[in-house]
Amino acid sequence: MKRIKNNKYSKNRNKRLLKRRFEVYHINEFNTSKLNCYTEKENGNLKVTYKNSKDEEKEKSLHLILTYKMSSNRIGCINRDTNAVKNMRKITAYLLDHKERPKKFTQNKILQLV
């Protein structure tokens, strides 16, 4: 029996099978983890202060956890992947209703003539 794990064609085959019965959308992940899913403003990385072995205080930035300012002026934390998934759900809902992507999640490519 063949192992599916190492089969490079299984991914494309599954896409084709899905395409036969459903309408398939490919989502460009531009700004999905960068913009907050609630406020649609840019998030920042969580900064943690700690003491090293020489008792010096250092600050470390955590890329996985994002911080944002909530409407009650408190600071909220959200996982980067969770935020991206919520934004992708927002993109698909908007795409199904309006037949285009939201402006904040579109990539504006400016072509320059050389």
Image (cartoon, grey):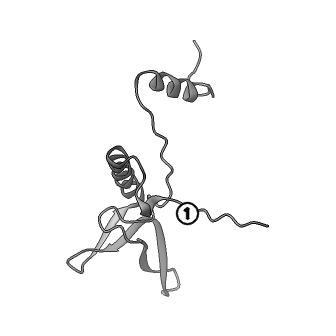
| Quadrant where the image shows the C terminus | bottom right
Q: Position of residue 38 (x, y in %)?
A: 29, 64
Question: Is residue 38 found left or right of 113 in the rendered image?
Answer: left
Q: Residue at x 59, y 16 (%)?
A: 2
Q: Residue at x 40, y 68 (%)?
A: 66
| Secondary structure type for disc 1 | loop
Amino acid on which disc 1 is placed: Asn
| Residue lying farthest to the front in this orientation | 113
| Residue lying farthest to the left in this orientation | 72
Q: Residue at x 37, y 46 (%)?
A: 92
| Quadrant where the image shows the N terminus | top right
In this orientation, which residue lies closer to the viewer: 106 or 36?
Answer: 106
In this orientation, which residue lies closer to the viewer: 36 or 113?
Answer: 113
| Residue lying farthest to the bottom in this orientation | 56
Q: Position of residue 86 (x, y in %)?
A: 34, 53
Q: Is residue 7 above or below residue 52?
A: above
In this orientation, which residue lies closer to the viewer: 112 or 66?
Answer: 112
Task: Tally the marks.
Answer: 1
Q: Position of residue 58 (x, y in %)?
A: 49, 83
- To which residue does mark 1 refer? 108
Q: Position of residue 108 (x, y in %)?
A: 55, 63
Label 1: few (<14), some (14–19) or many (≥20) C-alpha neighbours in 10 Å: few
| Residue lying farthest to the top in this orientation | 1
Question: Is residue 8 found left or right of 72 in the rendered image?
Answer: right
Q: Is residue 38 above or below residue 97?
A: below
Rendered image quadrant of residue 34: bottom left
